[in-house]
Amino acid sequence: MNQERYEDGWRVDERCTNCDVARQLAPGLIREVDGRSVVLRQPRDRSEVQRLNAAAHACPSRSIRPPAGRLEAALDPFPMALDSAVFLCGHNSPHTAGANSYLLRRPGGTSMMVDTPRWSASLAARYEQLGAVTDVLLTHRDHAAHGRRYADHFGARLWIHEGDLDAAPDADRVLRGTGPARIGEGVVAFPLPGHTRGSVLFLADERYCFSGDSFYWSRGTADIEVADSITWYSIGELADSLARTADRLHFEWLLPGHGDRRRLPADDMALRLRQLAARTRELRPRPIDFTAMRW
């Protein structure tokens, strides 16, 4: 019987910034060694080739190199469906520290973009194929780099919180205060100051939580965590935000900017979030240290 063979030669080059994106998309194939990603082993089947191609097309530094040396556009899987209403944009931008971004489909055939991938007119056209984009939702200042450009291309409204307004001073909609605000049918913004002064999470349909950099799913602890070593504004404020908000958040999907994604039953997520709020209350400020992050 003939057995399909897969070419060796996948590698990570020296441009890697250790952002974790490739490890999210190709677990078991790419891991961290000495502060950068490395290819753990070569693919053994078609699905593993697809995972490596996803990692390569998402990598913000274009460090994931296939055997032929150049990426094939035909093998680009993005936007990638995570669920019936949520797609991962891929093509993470070096100007947002490699943050993940998402498309949220809405009833009636429109969609919203949460944070942004690298800017490209061809990418924007591809994302529009999922439905006219009506809103670009920025979770905080670190992810604002391409917001105006995407919003203008789509003819969409650009949203940011007043605490981070200097990062997008030409935003069309400005969230204020710490109370929840309705963005559209089924979509609510919850200001969550802590990671930055103007951090926000967006809750959709009581199913999807776009948490920005406020909290994420950790593969290391198999739980929801905060990234306290890169909390720019105040870990104390983040603890207060979680205490104020945790009981109001009901969702199944955790979809962060950095760190891993996870789907769990809503009751399980709710319990974990309350426990995270209690743990965060015990944390104390420490200097910003990217090298301390272990996703």
Image: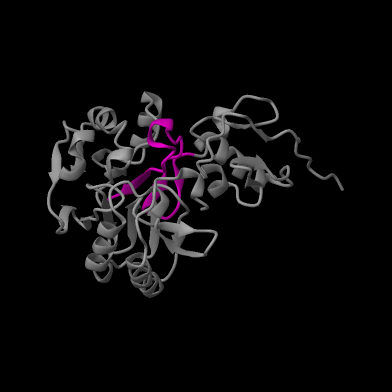
As rendered, which of 241 and 289 lies closer to the eye?
A: 289
Question: Furthest residue to the right?
Answer: 1
- Image quarter for residue 186? bottom left
Residue 42, percent from left and from top? 73, 42
Residue 238, percent from left and from top? 28, 58
**Colour scheme in use:** one colour
- Image quarter for residue 208? bottom left
- Please report the residue visible at 67 percent of the width from the left and 34 percent of the height from the top: 11
- Please report the residue visible at 49 percent of the width from the left and 58 percent of the height from the top: 218
- Please report the residue visible at 42 percent of the width from the left and 33 percent of the height from the top: 93
- Please report the residue visible at 40 percent of the width from the left and 71 percent of the height from the top: 272
Could one spot residue 69 in this view of the protein? yes
Asked if the magenta segment contains residue 81, the reply would be yes
Asked if the magenta segment contains residue 213, the reply would be no
Image check: 1 left or right of 239? right
Residue 255, percent from left and from top? 39, 54
Image check: 66 left or right of 108? right
The number of numbered discs placed on residues in the rendered structure image is 0
Above or below residue 140? Residue 227 is: below
Above or below residue 268? Residue 33 is: above
- Image quarter for residue 39? top right
Image check: 156 left or right of 257? left
Residue bounds of the magenta highlight:
78-106
As rendered, which of 184 and 64 lies closer to the eye?
A: 64
As rendered, which of 279 and 46 lies closer to the eye?
A: 279
As rendered, which of 146 and 284 lies closer to the eye?
A: 284
Residue 62, percent from left and from top? 54, 30
Could one spot residue 204 in this view of the protein? no
